[in-house]
Each structure stands twice: as structure tokens, then as C-alpha cells.
Image (cartoon, rainbow, N blue to C red):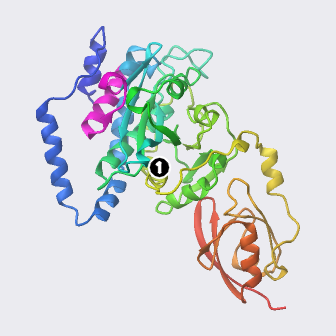
Amino acid sequence: MPLPRTIQRSLNSPRLPVRVPAAALLRLAAIVAAATSIAGFSSAADMASAARESLSAGDARRHVTTLADDTLEGRRAGSRGGRAASAYLAEQLERIGTAPAGESGSFFQPFRGMRNVIAIVRGRDPELSREAVLVGAHYDHVGYGTPSNSYGPTGYIHNGADDNASGVAGLLEIAEALSLLPTRPRRTIVLAFWDGEEIDLLGSRHFITNRPPPLAHHTIVFSVNLDMIGRLRDRTLEVFGSRTAVGLRRCVTAANRTDELALAFTWELSDDSDHYPFIAAGIPTLMFHTGLHPEYHRPSDDAHLVNYEGIPPVTRVALETVLAVADDSGPAPVFRPECRRESESGRRRLESPAPPAVPKRWGLGTREDPGDPTAPIVVRVSPQTPTALAGVAVGDRIVAIDGKPLVDQEAMIRRLSEAGPEVTLTLERRGVLREIRCLAKTQ
């Protein structure tokens, strides 16, 4: 497909000038189009629903194929192709109508010959708008590849369609969905496209310590990172960082209610993507990822291999998670320093069988998860007991009993002790909620 004019101009220009605002006529056309669209909704709820449904596989394909075109030469940080990619992002944000939050009224935050692309959706609450929820994705890749950043062969264009044109496409779709909401969220939302991720996470690290002027007085209270979301397989979405704050697992599970992806919550917290500088800075953070594959950091990571139909459901979970925090009138998530020390061995200890605590008639053993005490983990189901016969499985999390959410394991034990011969358990299994009716034996 033909490259957008911005990229063509950038590649043909020796100086690659900063993008200038669109003509007034284009602005007027966008306003008229938005007004026409809004008039077609019967209610604010309809518009909010339409915003979420605006996430499009076709638009994701357009963004990925543009950014992963050979003409951008692999979008190496600071290169001609990288600057052309950033100009494309600025053009798309301006088209959507999202406000710039970079330096000197632009979308760009320059550093060390590179530049992040930053936009802002200001919160509506006079107090909470000083807090910001950030959602980001890196747009750079490795250019022609070197022995230090490619699995080979080197010397060929590495287009990085999944890594990370897919995450950038998802973030652009989120920006467009936010522009369709009937009211802005209470908290401010920052949209950040990072440069230099492939060079020691330079873009996100620079942002942590050097805020552009429009964000100088905002506190980042929560962040989400989209990295490689273009290879959804078996409807499985990997979620990193759920233990960085109490309740994040439940938040993502609730956000998954429409698409019912299989959520694989992982304990690993590695400095291998732009979520890590935020965790290191003590900010609750999640990363969404659809897994590695043989084309990772090879020239073969091309646009035709991307699962475009898989990008909207992943992006919808991210959008719903961001909005849940951004529009919550209560306190923001609180970072758990313990998450940095919790390892896979800790997970295995947590999920090992525990001494009986639940009344024997239910045949159930559980442990409390410090990262989310509101959802005790099932670690034992005795054969031929009410819970086993009802289909409860080891690894399930109990989030409610008879429709009432749990506070902690003690509350769960008390309710099951006081329950009659029948209870309905609301379980979370791999990120999907389900209700199971259990009939207890009388003793």
C-alpha cells in the first residue's frame, strides 16, 4: 500500500523536519465528522460502547503494514526510518484530535538523537486529573540487525511487525477509542510511544527522569505497556506485573469479561521491556504480550504473519483496564515493593497444599495470595466432594460467594462455615469468571 505523505516527505528530506499542524480545513472536517458521529448515538452509554467497539482489525493492519514497510528500514532508534515512523505517529494523533504533550507544543520528546512521541487526554476531575495513567508501546526496532540484537541473518531489514508495530497499532486504536468517549475519565491518560526500547529501554528511562512540560505536575499512578500483541494464539494473553499492586489481577479479569481471553498471569519481572523502568520507579504496572515466536528479532518478523483479528480483543482488555483505573473515584493502586523479590519458587510455595481451613464438608483447600488477598487460590480439591463434583479445580481463585465479593481468605472461610447446604462460588480461571453451584453434604 502507498506510504502516508508524512513518511514519504520524511524519507525524502535530508533534515526530517518536525511535523507541522494540519491545515485548518482538515481540522474543520474532523470536527464536523465527530459531531455527525456523536449525533447518531442515543445515549452516552451507546457512545461509550461504540468507543470500545471502534477497535478495528482493519485499522490495526493499516498501522502495522505502514510501520513494518521496508522503506522504514527497521525503525532503528535515531535513524531516518525511526524519525519517519515518529512523524507518522504524530500525524495519526493529530488526526484523532489527541493533544500533544511533548516539548514546545509538539508531540515529540527528544533525547540523545531519538524522540519519544507523547500525547495527553486530560482528566475531568479537578483533583484527580493531577494523577495520570500511562499506556505505552515502543515503536523502534533493530534496523538491519547486528549480532548483539538479532538472531540473524543480519544485514537484512528487520521490520518488527510484531515487535512492536503491533503494540503501537493497539495504542493508536486506544487513542482513537478515547476520543469517542462521551466524557473524559477522572484521571489524566498519557499515551507514550517510546523510542530506544531496543537500546536498554532508553526512551522510557528518559521519560521517568525527564518529564516534558505538560506533564511536569502530574504523578504517574499506574502504567500499562503493550509489547508484541500481534501473535495471539489459542486466545492466550500473557499478563506481567499483576502483583505490583493489590487488585490488579481482578481488574484485568473484569476487563476481560467481553472477550474471555485465556489470561496467563506470570510472576516474571525482567528488565526486557518498557514496563520495567516504571516498576523500578515504584509505579504499579502491567504488560500485555502474546508470546515469543521463531521470528522474534529476525528479518522474518513481517506484517503478513500478524494475527490482526487478535489485536482488537487484546487492546480492548488493555483499554478497559486503563479506564477502570483512570475513571475510579477512589484511591489509585498502591505499589507493592515485595513484588520485586517474589520469585517463581515463591509462587510454587504459595500454590502448594495448605493445612485444612475451609469446613471439611466442602472438600476444599485454599491459600491467600498476598498480591491479591481478595481472591484465595484453590490448592486442593478432595475427590467426590461437593466442590470436586461441581467442577472446582486447583488453581481457581474464589472471588465471590453467593454474589458477594470477598475481602480475604478469612472472610471466605467464615462465609463457607455459615453457609447452608448450597452455595454459588464465583471463580476466576485463567482470567475468565464463572459461577459454580455447590451442594454440600450434611454432617
Q: Quadrant of the C terminus?
A: bottom right
Find residue 354 and report its horizontal and vertical position in percent: 86, 64
- Is 34 or 239 nearer to us in this picture? 34
> Which residue, as the protein is rendered here, is positioned at the far top?
14
Secondary structure under the numbered disc 1 in the rendered image: helix
At label 1, counting other C-alpha atoms closer than 10 Å, the crowd grade (few under 14, some 14-19, many 20 or more) is many
Q: Where is residue 263 shown, x and y percent of the image?
A: 59, 54
The quarter of the picture where residue 374 lies is bottom right
Q: Is residue 171 above or below residue 49?
A: above
Residue numbers of the magenta segment: 84-107
Looking at the image, which residue is at 53% across and 25% down?
A: 209
Judge whether residue 149 is colored magenta: no
Q: Residue at x 72, y 39 (%)?
A: 340
Mark 1 = which residue? Answer: 322
Residue 240 can be seen, yes or no: yes
Q: Residue furthest left?
A: 25
**Which residue is situated farthest in the front direction here?**
127
Task: State left or right for residue 185 relative to residue 350.
Answer: left
Amino acid bearing label 1? Val
173 relative to 111, above or below: below
Among the 4 quarters of the image, the one containing residue 276: top right
Taking the image as shown, residue 369 lies to the left or right of residue 151, namely right
Please state the horizontal and vertical placement of residue 199, each as a whole percent of the image: 56, 20
| Front position in the image: 65 or 256 | 256
Tell which residue pokes out farthest to the right in this image.
Answer: 355
